[in-house]
């Protein structure tokens, strides 16, 4: 299934968050969206997923959803957004409960999602007992359990420490390779962008527009190899040059009040 | 400064982290009661003005021995229980509505803030007119007193349910009723429970006002009676009963809370 | 000399008002400040707390408890329910009257409105029951804290019977909001109120108490001469004005509601002893209270009904 | 499913975000008063039981016209002001001490939780004995009523000062007194101010109880008097005065808060 | 000035956080401390700075402090620890106020620190108006203003987004080059460790011990150059191998209760 954003613009009161964005994410493709703070990345993702009504423009999907898909456009959140009063199992089951599934179908799906994210032994644990990395795994399991056609990820790793981020990135890649899900992935992290993206879309600072798009041709599995270290470093440096000045300006903006 | 002489780094942390001292409260109570008793024994506190702990204890003992304590407690607990249940249930319904719907909130906030600070004893004559002098007026006093704080806390509790959880539920396409049931209500529970703590204290405080209206039995009625008879030792015994009741209710709510919020 | 008295703005305090406005206290060299209280219970409390030197009010359980603890001591009388004089009345609700409650000997089992347990109203019903040979039962008494609440309850039929001070009782009967079926004095004559002070004042400032009681007696005598001798006396109108002023009422209303006051402020001493005994029997007053220490008979000559 | 037909993504967000509606409260008040007046005019509410808004307004008007309103307000404001100042100041001192020192906390918590739920009207006879029948007993009633909530909020406020800020100050070698002055006190300010809001409402509620002790003037005394006389329209006029007073105090505290906490 | 930790051990109740650590940070040297979550890095830093009393062992400094040093051991915190009720200027001045300085001396120092961290135009702004990166600059200015002999930094960049982290790392390096401060720097981030450290000390998971120490010989200024990209990638890979398994175990620990 692919995702098509055309002519998207959005304002919050007087503030123009997004000026005009056209973006298509092809079926099975992973597009990484980077840009300075406040440039409208989260806004764009909210619009893509139907959580925000765009000021202008259209959001459409095309193509077939995978078999058993219950929620074509599914989010993974930066702050995990787990219900603290539900166990891991309960959190993963949440998204299934309002669908007409038999109890055994439901249990099977939940179990498969927990297995995929390595959470099986934690099924009955409450979120407070888990580390940040484990919590985001629950977030991933909850997304996977509905067999999404398109994953929308808003800085899913940025609340984690660097080592956990490393561990999760590897797991995420493995899941993607298996499920071949279309993904729109927002991050600030150039290393993440370079590791995960088929294409990297760079947004300008507010009001957000698409400034540039870089395709990464190396297969994802090969990017870690020592012989590609220089190429990857060069890619990151290019991305950094595209973004550095805008990031510097964005950092120094003072909120009034 | 000698280059080579290592100096130890001085400790400058610690403190500002009150540590529990299990014995301290008991000791404090014992000390206060002891001093008080000593002052009474030494004649520094005239027993008319301030009876000694022993006198109060004796009054409490004879109240318990006569069997009246049970009757007073029973009558008051019935009123508190019923009044609190009605007030808290109605308050919860209104508060949740105010938390969920803009319209209910826009209307509710100013009405609540205008009515909340009205002293309940001011309304006793009205309650007599509306509800008579039997149980209904007493229950209504307590119910009204617990209604407003419950509204405020329930409404605040819904407000404090993290919006990201609601957005998450929406992103999975949960219907509104499911979102309310599975996200908003459990998320509001901690706030609602702490509101219950407050409204339970208020219910206790109001039992005296409520029992000003022709009550024969009840801890509040006992306090009023002994106050009128200037039996200060018995009055304070009644106050001690209320105080212990407050501690007991607090402890019970603490248990309930710990169980319902074990996920925290 | 400056002194003060705590009291309620009621006609039963008439001798004090007369004494102040007709100069009896001034004649004794006393400048008296009136301190009006909100409830009968507050009057002896004001003596105990040192807010006032003297007090006059009805005799209640609370009063005797304070007296028993040595906070106050009676020195002279105030109002009395005296046979032949009409003061408080029994008022029944219209509903109860319609059900057949028309006589004072039918209160058994009826709901009775009071201000508080231990009040003068309570005592009267208690003695009435004793005299008629029945028991005040549990659940029969409704303590409503204030006189107006009590009046409202009988008007609304929420209680069957109350006692009302004149002129309220008469007014209720006239307005058809209830029925007046008898006078307290005809059934339970008793020493309703007293003048009292702190034992410490007696011990340390005896001359002050003596002067105060003398002036009070003169005022009582003037009251007696004008209101209690069959025909009104020559100063009756002037005294009514004075009482009306202090009770925030009008002379006609005052006239309809004057209590009997002993001309020499003598007490019915045995009645006081009986009151204490009744209060003790009903566990309203501590068993340790000794009637002998509650009254000081040395300020007024010729007290009545001295106990043997 | 046709591969090529693009389908728009359905909107599923929004809601659960009550938006302010400036006109709604006024409309609500107007509607409530209008309905009430209509019901009264239609004779559905007997004016003895529930006077109409117009009657209450008239009672309020004549109270204001007679000049008594000023006297009542003046007397009550004096008692509230003095009582609240005393109670809040003492409560602040005790609450801050409990926040800072383990010992004060260990002793304070149980004592406060035992004494907090004691109804102030229960203590009126004692207050008369202790403080007499003049202003002191009235002021003491209000002071005691505001003391405990202030203790609780001040103590909680100190507790909520982020410990990392204190560690930071220690890491720069600030002396303890400086830490208290520059970190703990400003950090506790928001909690203390919101405690003041609560204690101010309580002071208002207690003015009726306080003025049960032989007050000639005062809004509470007026309410008690009119209640005793069953003049329900005037009683409700007095209640309206208290309610407006509450709103006014709330608005003033809101201004003070906005200014003192402009850094938030 | 150098910092010497010898035989440090620490327990919290039943939990042994640090078993036995000996570590010396030489004058002007930057030692980076990495290790899995919960291995006792923050505990060790607290002990080094005198904020925690160690269960066993000694903490000492030796050598001369710089001229005008008011607080030899100075922290920079992960959560910035700014007083929200003070302006930027007020926060920076806080650490000076209890020292006997004249008003002009104080103003001069504050101004110099603000200039160094590029905060001059923000002197009168409250922290809430600043972005995360700007807040940490204030934390740096507050540390610099007391002319510290030894800086103790506990994941100073980990609360920031990746782009801001990049910007701050460059500034931090510039400040260090100028001031030549001794530094003990705690992080989870291997890229940070490789960029900033003269030596990288790797701790094992709880109870914390020193597992290995790697010296980085490339001068810090040269590490970004393309010709060293492969070497740096290799260094990070080595660090990752040292830590990966322990990080994996640490992530999956369940807190009880
Ligand atoms: N609900 C809102 N109301 C008003 N303004 C908003 C709202 N949400 C976002 N904004 C503003 O819109 C702009 C874009 O916000 P958005 O969250 O989309 O940016 P972002 O690129 O995701 O930023 P970041 O990288 O910090 O997450 C920002 O300036 C933000 O302050
Ligand atoms: N005050 C404390 N009381 C009890 N246990 C504590 C306390 N502080 C830390 N611990 C525990 O001690 C261990 C070491 O904690 P510390 O904060 O030093 O680890 P860390 O290496 O800094 O971890 P992180 O990388 O997550 O910051 C952890 O298991 C932690 O849970
Ligand atoms: Mg965002
Ligand atoms: Mg740490």
Image (spheres, coloured by chain):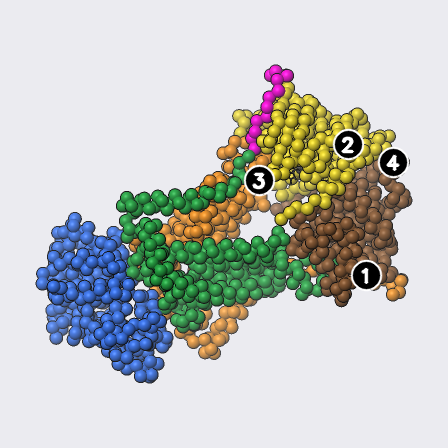
Chain colours: A brown, B green, C blue, D orange, E yellow
Looking at the image, residue B78 lies above or below residue E64: below
Q: Kindly identify which chain the residue marked by label 4 belongs to.
A: A
- The answer to if C185 sits in the magenta stretch is no
The dot on residue D171 is none
Residue E227 appears left or right of C305: right
Task: Tell me whether marks 1 and 3 sit on the same chain.
Answer: no
Query: Are tags 2 and 4 found on a single chain?
Result: no
Q: Which residue is mark 2?
A: E194
Q: Label 2, label 4: how many angstroms apart (C-alpha)?
A: 16 Å
Residue behind mark 4: A226
Residue located at (72% from left, 43% from top): E251
> Can see residue D66?
no
Q: Position of residue D20 (x, y in %)?
A: 61, 59
Q: Residue E8: image x %, image y %?
A: 64, 29
Q: Which residue does the image show at 32% across and 72% down from the upper left?
A: C137
- Queried whether the magenta region covers residue B7, the answer comes back as yes
Subunit ID for the residue under disc 3: D
Highlighted range, magenta: B1-13
Residue drawn at 22 percent across, 63 percent down: C276
Name the foreground residue: C170 vs E46. Answer: E46
Report whether mark 1 lies on the same chain as mark 4: yes
Q: Quadrant of residue E124?
A: top right
Is C146 displayed left or right of E104 in the figure? left
On the image, numbered disc 1 is attached to which residue?
A: A69
Protein chain holding label 2: E
Q: CA distance from mark 4 to mark 3?
A: 45 Å
Residue on which the image places disc 3:
D163
For image coordinates 31% across by 69% down, the residue present is C114
């Amino acid at each position: 299934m692919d995702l098509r954003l055309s002519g998207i613009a959005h304002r919050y009161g007087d503030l123009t968050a997004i000026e005009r964005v056209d973006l298509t994410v092809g079926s099975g493709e992973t597009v990484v969206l980077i840009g300075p703070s406040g440039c409208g990345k989260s806004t764009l993702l909210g619009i893509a997923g139907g959580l925000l009504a765009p000021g202008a423009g259209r959001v459409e999907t095309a193509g077939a959803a995978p078999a058993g898909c219950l929620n074509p456009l599914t989010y993974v959140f930066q702050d995990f957004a787990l219900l603290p009063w539900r166990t891991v199992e309960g959190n993963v089951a949440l998204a299934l409960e309002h669908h007409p599934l038999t109890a055994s179908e439901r249990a099977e799906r939940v179990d498969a999602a927990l297995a995929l994210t390595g959470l099986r032994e934690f099924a009955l644990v409450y979120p407070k007992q888990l580390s940040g990395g484990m919590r985001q795994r629950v977030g991933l399991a909850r997304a996977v359990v509905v067999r999404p056609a398109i994953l929308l990820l808003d800085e899913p790793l940025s609340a984690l420490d660097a080592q956990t981020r490393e561990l999760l990135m590897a797991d995420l890649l493995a899941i993607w390779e298996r499920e071949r899900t279309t993904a729109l992935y927002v991050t600030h992290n150039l290393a993440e962008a370079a590791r995960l993206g088929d294409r990297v879309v760079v947004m300008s600072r507010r009001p957000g527009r698409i400034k540039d798009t870089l395709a990464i041709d190396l297969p994802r599995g090969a990017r870690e190899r020592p012989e590609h270290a220089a190429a990857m470093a060069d890619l990151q440096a290019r991305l950094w040059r595209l973004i550095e000045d805008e990031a510097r300006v964005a950092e120094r903006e003072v909120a009034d009040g | 400064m000698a280059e080579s002489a290592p100096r130890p780094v001085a400790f400058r942390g610690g403190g500002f982290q009150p540590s529990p001292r299990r014995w301290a409260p008991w000791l404090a109570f014992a000390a206060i009661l002891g001093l008080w008793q000593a002052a009474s024994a030494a004649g520094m506190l005239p027993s008319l003005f301030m009876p000694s702990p022993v006198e109060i204890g004796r009054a409490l003992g004879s109240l318990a021995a006569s069997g009246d304590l049970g009757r007073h407690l029973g009558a008051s607990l019935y009123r508190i229980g019923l009044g609190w249940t009605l007030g808290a249930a109605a308050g919860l319904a209104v508060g949740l509505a105010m938390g969920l719907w803009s319209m209910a909130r826009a209307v509710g906030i100013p009405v609540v803030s205008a009515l909340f600070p009205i002293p309940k004893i001011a309304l006793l004559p009205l309650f007599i007119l509306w509800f008579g002098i039997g149980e209904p007026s007493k229950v209504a006093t307590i119910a009204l007193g617990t209604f407003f704080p419950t509204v405020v806390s329930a409404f605040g509790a819904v407000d404090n349910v993290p919006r990201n959880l609601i957005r998450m539920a929406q992103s999975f396409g949960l219907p509104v009723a499911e979102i309310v049931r599975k996200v908003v209500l459990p998320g509001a529970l901690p706030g609602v429970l702490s509101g219950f703590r407050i409204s339970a204290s208020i219910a206790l405080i109001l039992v005296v006002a409520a029992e000003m209206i022709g009550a024969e039995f009840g801890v509040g009625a006992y306090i009023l009676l002994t106050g009128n008879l200037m039996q200060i030792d018995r009055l304070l015994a009644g106050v001690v009963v209320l105080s212990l009741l407050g501690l007991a209710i607090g402890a019970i709510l603490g248990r309930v809370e710990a169980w319902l919020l074990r996920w925290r | 000399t400056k002194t003060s008295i705590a009291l309620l703005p009621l006609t039963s305090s008439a001798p004090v008002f007369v004494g102040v406005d007709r100069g009896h206290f001034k004649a004794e060299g006393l400048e008296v400040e009136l301190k009006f209280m909100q409830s009968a219970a507050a009057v002896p409390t004001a003596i105990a707390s040192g807010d006032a030197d003297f007090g006059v009010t009805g005799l209640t359980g609370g009063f005797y408890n304070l007296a028993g603890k040595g906070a106050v001591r009676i020195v002279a009388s105030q109002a009395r329910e005296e046979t032949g004089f009409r003061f408080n009345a029994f008022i029944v609700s219209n509903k109860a009257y319609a059900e057949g409650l028309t006589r004072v000997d039918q209160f058994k089992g009826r709901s009775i409105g009071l201000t508080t347990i231990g009040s003068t109203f309570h005592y009267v019903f208690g003695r009435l029951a004793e005299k008629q040979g029945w028991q005040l039962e549990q659940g029969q008494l409704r303590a409503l804290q204030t006189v107006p609440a009590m009046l409202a309850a009988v008007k609304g039929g929420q209680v069957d019977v109350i006692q009302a001070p004149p002129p309220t009782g008469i007014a209720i009967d006239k307005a058809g909001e209830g029925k007046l079926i008898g006078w307290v004095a005809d059934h339970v004559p008793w020493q309703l109120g007293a003048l009292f002070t702190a034992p410490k004042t007696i011990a340390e400032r005896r001359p002050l108490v003596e002067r105060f009681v003398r002036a009070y007696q003169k005022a009582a005598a003037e009251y007696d001469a004008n209101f209690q001798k069959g025909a009104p006396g020559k100063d009756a109108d002037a005294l009514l004005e004075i009482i009306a002023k202090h009770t925030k009422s009008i002379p006609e209303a005052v006239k309809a509601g004057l209590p009997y006051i002993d001309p020499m402020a003598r007490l019915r001493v045995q009645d006081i002893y009986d009151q204490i005994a009744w209060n003790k029997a009903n566990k309203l007053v501590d068993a340790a209270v000794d009637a002998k220490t509650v009254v000081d008979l040395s300020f007024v000559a010729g007290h009545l009904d001295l106990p043997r």
